[in-house]
Image (spheres, rainbow, N blue to C red):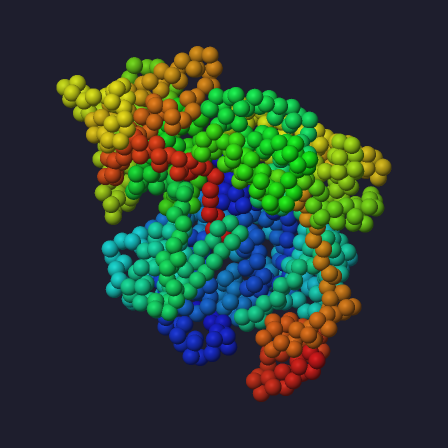
């Protein structure tokens, strides 16, 4: 095991190599190296983010040193960007760093800085005044970069993620197995037929029949009896009773596994409604050369489900859970699911190539591995879309919702209103409320209230 | 001198006074501990004691940010103290590179704190601190993380339920060092015999096991110990290739019950609060006069009795040598046709069960742990099939 794997061992168990790769190819821009800002970067630098940039026009003050772990007394008077950058770098020698001490948000958004800005994969803006923030948010939105807005005041904090669209392929689902018991494909039926003589098997063999085969056998018996497969809870319990009756001894583990799997695995396979909704999304309907790989893959998958091979189902994940069986039978069964998954994956890839050709995009833009990962997680794909900041703050503020919320004195909405009011205050007076002597506090509060109202 | 942030604005004077004068104990300086120590220092606490028995490992550095590469192998408690002091030298931090269960940390010592915080990674120590805090009547903040999840609870003697008021499930996985270096229960010896020794010699060695990377216990993050354990496993792998030699079983015995034990016993810091294992000597046990009078179990026709009866150490030795030899012969025979052949563990395989029973009892004997019958081992087996496989609690600050 190399030192890098050793260093990241614990986290790799959480997000796998794919997650680590995403992290290592990210370049995060932090606007303002405040205590909260550096805390956020610390938590990204430690697990090995690719690169970070601190953009901060401020020079370090005594107050900064008092609350920021990543500033030292000798940094007072120095550029806060350079100082925090240097101390954060000590956390992980693998991480690249940049400090842009003199950049204000306006300079960051200027055309001359475009090349730098384009290199960012994500922007974190801490305590950025609202006018600057809206300009930054507009630019991030337009360039499809996620923006994380953070504000802190005493014990309170505000966090808002902004981004037009975030697509997730590997959502690390708990159970990926799709056994296709209600729609067994030919190879699976062929395999199950090998166990037709189950009743005359030796006890040892009988106790090692994989539970998938047991379920298929009793599902067939159920169908012979009722003319259909079990649908509701009661019918599934009847299926369980039939399986129990087929046991030779009360401790036949494989039969217990079969009964345990009835409720989970005996369902009609169908396209989940969340995926169906994505199929109907305009981004899937109308592919353009600008479409992301996610949408091209999704469209190819939709074409697949409509084809004769897909037969209305998503490509098979190909994952087989552990079960009581002898090794030979288990491996054979695993191969059958895997081969079907591979065949589905190839078919999806063909549709991908057709779309790429139609869009005049290079056919190798989406590779085998990407298609395979997409197919494997087909039932668990996710698309997250956020409202733009301009929409929330300016165009369609949630006035009605806030009014309702504020009627409840214990509502947390008051914090939201106060954070926003403090920003409005800043826009008017170029300073935050509470930053002057106590005598004018009362006045400040009144001003905030009038702004909020 | 570092400027003080305006904590009075945040706390008010009365609370600030309590915070600055409070004596806080932090048990554990790992993932949670590093974050907690930083937050305590940043939020105005000025009298802190840190206890951790562990040393820093490379795999800690992705989250335990008070530590850097140059600190590897040093005490977590001491380095955490130094790093935090750099931030604020005015705070009084005391560190103990020690086990919280040691005698020195008695109830009286606990009484000296206004607040105890647990930043631990194992049930045993959590229970211990919980009991000490109840006895000393000190409030405890208990915390833990697993994967993306975490929790924190306040335990105040007499006012809230305590840590053990709700029964906790016993973990079904064991830290690698418990299995490989410091077993305390029969099950640890059984897991060692089956998952490590048997697997290394006759079955497919579990890579994680061999490389000793799986652990949810900070004491396993001890870099030098892990390296030594890895070497041990590799040396055993070399003995595996000696299968077929006339003294094969003797080589295995020497390695597992003498050489490795001598090394373990020499690690003094491990045995400060428990007695070190005593190595076994092949020649003493293989005394021919004694052998003659001992019925060898595996070949005895009186199997049913031997199943339930606990074997003597002499018998364990006999059975170990006999089963190792037989398993070696079987492995060699299989390898004639298939070079990569293994003898997979099967609890119904008499040789395999003999081997695991004998090996685990010999180990239990070394560590002063209760011996188990062959039948017990067979039953235990069912309950702990997946020990030392997948697992893991990952602590992220």
Q: Position of residue B253 (x, y in %)?
A: 28, 25
Residue at the bottom extreme?
A439
Q: Position of residue A367 (x, y in %)?
A: 71, 34
Residue B284 visible in rendering: yes
Q: Is residue B306 left or right of residue B25?
A: left
Look at the picture and state if A80 lies above or below B389.
below
State the residue at coordinates (42%, 52%).
Answer: B30
State the residue at coordinates (45%, 19%).
Answer: B341
State the residue at coordinates (44%, 37%).
Answer: B386
Q: Position of residue A116 (x, y in %)?
A: 71, 53
The foreground one among B189 and A331 is A331
Residue B78 visible in rendering: no
The foreground one among B99 and A267 is A267
The foreground one among A435 and B192 is B192
- Where is the C terminus of chain A found, in terms of image quarters? bottom right
Look at the picture and state if A396 lies above or below B75.
below
Total numbered badges shown on the rendered structure = 0
Q: Is residue B63 left or right of residue A381?
A: left
The picture quadrant where one finds residue B251 is top left
Residue at the front extreme?
A225
Q: Position of residue A273 (x, y in %)?
A: 71, 48
Residue at the left extreme?
B289
The picture quadrant where one finds residue B1 is bottom left
State the residue at coordinates (32%, 56%).
Answer: B128
């Amino acid at each position: 095991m190399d030192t890098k794997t050793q260093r990241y061992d614990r986290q790799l168990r959480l997000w796998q190599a794919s997650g680590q790769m995403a992290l290592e190819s990210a370049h995060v821009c932090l606007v303002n190296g405040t205590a909260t800002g550096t805390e956020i970067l610390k938590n990204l630098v430690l697990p090995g983010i690719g690169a970070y940039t601190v953009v901060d026009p401020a020079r370090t003050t005594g107050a900064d040193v008092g609350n920021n772990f990543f500033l030292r007394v000798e940094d007072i008077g120095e550029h806060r960007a350079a100082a925090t950058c240097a101390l954060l770098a000590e956390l992980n020698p693998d991480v690249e760093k940049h400090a842009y001490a003199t950049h204000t948000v306006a300079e960051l958004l200027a055309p001359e800085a475009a090349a730098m800005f384009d290199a960012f994969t994500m922007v974190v803006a801490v305590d950025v005044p609202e006018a600057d923030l809206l300009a930054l948010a507009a630019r991030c939105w337009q360039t499809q970069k996620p923006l994380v807005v953070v504000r802190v005041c005493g014990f309170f904090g505000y966090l808002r993620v902004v981004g037009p669209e975030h697509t997730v392929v590997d959502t690390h689902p708990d159970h990926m197995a799709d056994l296709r018991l209600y729609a067994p494909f030919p190879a699976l039926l062929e395999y199950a037929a090998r166990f037709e003589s189950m009743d005359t098997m030796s006890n040892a063999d009988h106790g090692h029949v994989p539970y998938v085969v047991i379920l298929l056998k009793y599902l067939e018996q159920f169908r012979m009896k009722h003319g259909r497969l079990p649908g509701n809870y009661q019918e599934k319990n009847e299926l369980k009773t039939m399986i129990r009756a087929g046991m030779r001894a009360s401790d036949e583990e494989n039969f217990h596994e079969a009964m345990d799997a009835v409720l989970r695995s005996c369902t009609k396979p169908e396209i989940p409604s969340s995926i169906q909704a994505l199929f109907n999304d305009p981004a899937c309907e109308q592919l353009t050369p600008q479409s992301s790989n996610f949408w091209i893959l999704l469209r190819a998958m939709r074409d697949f489900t409509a084809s004769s091979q897909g037969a209305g189902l998503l490509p098979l994940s190909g994952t087989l859970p552990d079960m009581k069986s002898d090794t030979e039978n288990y491996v054979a069964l695993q191969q059958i699911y895997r081969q079907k998954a591979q065949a589905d994956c190839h078919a999806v890839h063909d549709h991908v190539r057709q779309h790429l050709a139609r869009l005049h995009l290079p056919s190798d833009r989406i590779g085998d591995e990407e298609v395979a990962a997409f197919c494997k997680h087909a039932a668990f794909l996710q698309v997250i879309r956020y409202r733009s900041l301009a929409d929330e703050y300016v165009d369609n503020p949630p006035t009605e919702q806030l009014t309702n919320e504020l009627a409840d004195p214990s509502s947390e909405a008051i914090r939201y209103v106060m954070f926003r009011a403090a920003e409005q205050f800043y826009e008017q007076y170029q300073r935050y409320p509470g930053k002057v002597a106590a005598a004018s506090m009362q006045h400040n509060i009144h001003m905030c209230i009038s702004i909020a109202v | 001198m570092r400027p003080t942030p305006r904590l009075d604005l945040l706390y008010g004077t009365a609370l600030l006074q309590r915070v600055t004068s409070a004596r806080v104990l932090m048990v554990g300086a790992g993932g949670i501990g590093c974050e907690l120590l930083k937050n305590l220092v940043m939020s105005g606490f000025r009298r802190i004691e840190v206890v951790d028995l562990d040393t820093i490992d490379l795999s800690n550095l992705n989250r335990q940010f008070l530590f850097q590469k140059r600190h590897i192998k040093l005490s977590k408690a001491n380095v955490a103290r130094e790093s935090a002091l750099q931030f604020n030298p005015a705070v009084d931090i005391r560190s103990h590179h020690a086990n919280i269960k040691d005698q020195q940390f008695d109830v009286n010592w606990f009484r000296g704190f206004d607040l105890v915080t647990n930043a631990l990674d194992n049930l045993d120590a959590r229970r211990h601190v919980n009991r000490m805090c109840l006895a000393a009547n000190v409030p405890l903040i208990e915390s833990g993380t697993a994967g993306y999840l975490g929790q924190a609870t306040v335990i105040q003697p007499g006012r809230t339920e305590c840590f053990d008021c709700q029964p906790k499930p016993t973990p079904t996985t064991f830290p690698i060092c418990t299995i490989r270096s410091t077993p305390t229960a029969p099950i640890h010896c059984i897991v060692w015999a089956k998952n490590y020794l048997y697997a290394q010699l006759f079955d497919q060695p579990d890579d994680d096991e061999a490389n000793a990377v799986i652990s949810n216990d900070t004491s396993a993050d001890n870099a030098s110990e892990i390296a030594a354990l890895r070497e041990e496993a590799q040396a055993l792998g070399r003995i595996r290739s000696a299968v077929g030699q006339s003294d094969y079983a003797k080589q295995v015995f020497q390695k597992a019950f003498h050489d490795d034990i001598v090394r373990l016993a020499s690690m003094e810091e491990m045995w400060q609060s428990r007695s070190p294992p005593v190595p076994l000597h092949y020649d003493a046990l293989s005394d021919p006069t004694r052998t003659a009078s001992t019925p060898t179990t595996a070949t005895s026709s009186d199997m049913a009795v031997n199943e339930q009866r606990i074997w003597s150490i002499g018998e364990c030795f006999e059975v170990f040598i006999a089963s190792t030899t037989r398993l070696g012969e079987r492995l060699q025979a299989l390898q004639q046709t298939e070079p990569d052949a293994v003898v997979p563990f099967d609890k119904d395989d008499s040789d395999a069960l003999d081997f695991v029973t004998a090996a685990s009892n010999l180990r239990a004997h070394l560590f002063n742990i209760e011996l188990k019958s062959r039948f017990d081992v067979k039953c235990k087996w069912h309950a702990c099939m997946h020990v030392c496989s997948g697992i893991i609690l990952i602590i992220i600050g």
